[in-house]
Amino acid sequence: MQDKALLDRLQRERERITALLQLRQRVLDDIAKNKGTVAVGDVRGKFVRRSETGVVLLVGKEERTLPLNAFSPKILQTEGSRLKAFESRDVWLRAWLRYLQGTKLAQLKGELAEKYSTLAPLRLDMTAEFADTPSAAAEVLAELQSLPTSDDPKIARTSLNRLQETVIANRSSPLLQKRREAIDLLARALAERAFDPNDPAGLGLTGEAEHKDGVVKVRYTDPTKSPTADFDEVPNDQRKWLPESARLPYGGKHGLSSDGKNYQAAGTALLGWAAPLRGAFRLDVHCRIPESGNVDLVFMLMVSDQAALFCGMSGSVMVIDIPNLGKTDPSPVGGGGSYSFEKSNIWTMEFDGKRTLVTKVNGKETARVDTGELNTGELWLNVHSGSPLPIEMLELSCTPVVREPGKMREQFVTRTLAKLWP
């Protein structure tokens, strides 16, 4: 259960932001009605029309759009006084606008001491000096609080994307830092609504993704944005059928991680990608082979029910289907792939969506395998490398499948929150 005091404060701040937005709307309506000269900050011009993003003014002979965030707390205080928006019980809004401009609490003491009940919540919350870049931070907070939280995944995803952009760009702000828990609550609410199990674009993939007709093409080139290329440790209860490899004596981070510029696979780890795959897919691994060292990766395709296609770096493939072991041949097929030490190599695994898997190393076919009944399942990466293997890019074109929507949604939410703060 969420902390009640935190939720109460969040509700009070939402009400304040709503009042601020209502005041801004009142100012804009007055500007549109009078159609006169408008002066906001260092911009002065004749009103032309409203736009989706603000107000269009004629400055000299050129039209100029004045964005909504130009109506800062300072401007709203000035315009609000002109419109007599702070009389009687509404005096609290003027005090709050002054606070957002960096006015010291000592200077607000007299105003906060007035005997209006609307000032009591401010006295409760305004206990520390506000020493941020006032206008910008207040506008950021106003935008966050006004984001729609629709149950429509597309609308929620739009709001979530905007929240992520805004928070990441302003997360050092004391105003945002003090409200981190409340922002996380809002982000969680948006992320839960944005997740759509029927839309692969909503899976929260962290690579550069394109989505068309259910097919996702995702490219991983930047470990600072996607630290593990959406591969996570396979839970122990899902890997019991697979004998565990002896842990190699590697001193660095085991699995898939960053080497500072690219990815690297090293040590011993069994990792699973963000979602199972169905139908046709293609996986390209761009890697550099160190001249010395023990490097080895195995991609396991169509993992399900104690079965998988084991693809080794040599370009060989083994079909392991334990429930049908007497009907399938587990012997390696193909291999002999040739890698260069001088340049980047491309290891390719491509499935036609029916029953044929083709593997290539640097464009040369190394195996063509009949997958039999194996045509859908998870994508696992078995790392067993005594030396780091540099990977410049992972590129996957596929149709993801969501088998456990609740689990996938929570993973999506967790990834979303992890992106917000350093």
Image (cartoon, rainbow, N blue to C red):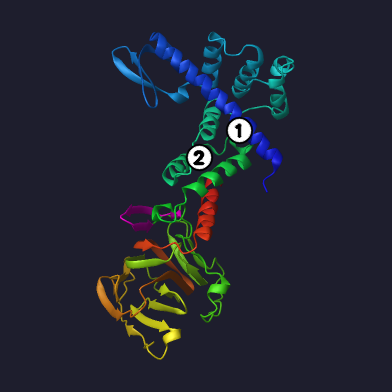
Callout 1 amino acid: Leu
Q: Write down the quadrant of residue 141 in the picture.
A: top right
Compared with 354, 93 (above or below) is: above
Q: At 29% from the left edge and 16% from the top edge, which residue is drawn?
A: 62
Decide which of 233, 83 is in the foreground and name it: 83
Residue farthest to the left, as pictured: 364
Left or right: residue 289 versus residue 174 is left
Residue farthest to the bottom, as pictured: 326
Q: At 40% from the left edge and 64% from the top edge, which residue is drawn?
A: 391
Per the picture, the main secondary structure of the magenta-coloured stretch is strand
Decide which of 351, 312 is in the foreground and name it: 351
Q: Position of residue 221 (x, y in %)?
A: 39, 56
Compared with 329, 254 (above or below) is: above
Q: At 32% from the left edge and 74% from the top edge, which residue is drawn?
A: 339
Q: At 42% from the left edge and 77% from the top edge, which residue is drawn?
A: 308
Q: For label 1, count other residues whose C-alpha is less than 10 Å away and answer few (under 14), some (14-19) or many (20+).
A: many
Q: Which residue is label 2 attached to?
A: 149
Q: Position of residue 52 (x, y in %)?
A: 38, 27
Residue range corresponding to the magenta coloring: 203-220
Q: Is residue 164 magenta?
A: no
Determine the secondary structure under disc 1.
helix
Q: Is residue 217 magenta?
A: yes
Mark 1 and mark 2: Cα distance apart in space: 22 Å
Lower sequence index among marks 1 and 2: 2
Q: Write down the quadrant of residue 214 in the picture.
A: bottom left
Compared with 217, 281 (above or below) is: below
Q: Position of residue 379 (x, y in %)?
A: 42, 69
Q: Which residue is label 1 attached to?
A: 175
Q: Nearer the viewer, mark 1 or mark 2?
A: 2
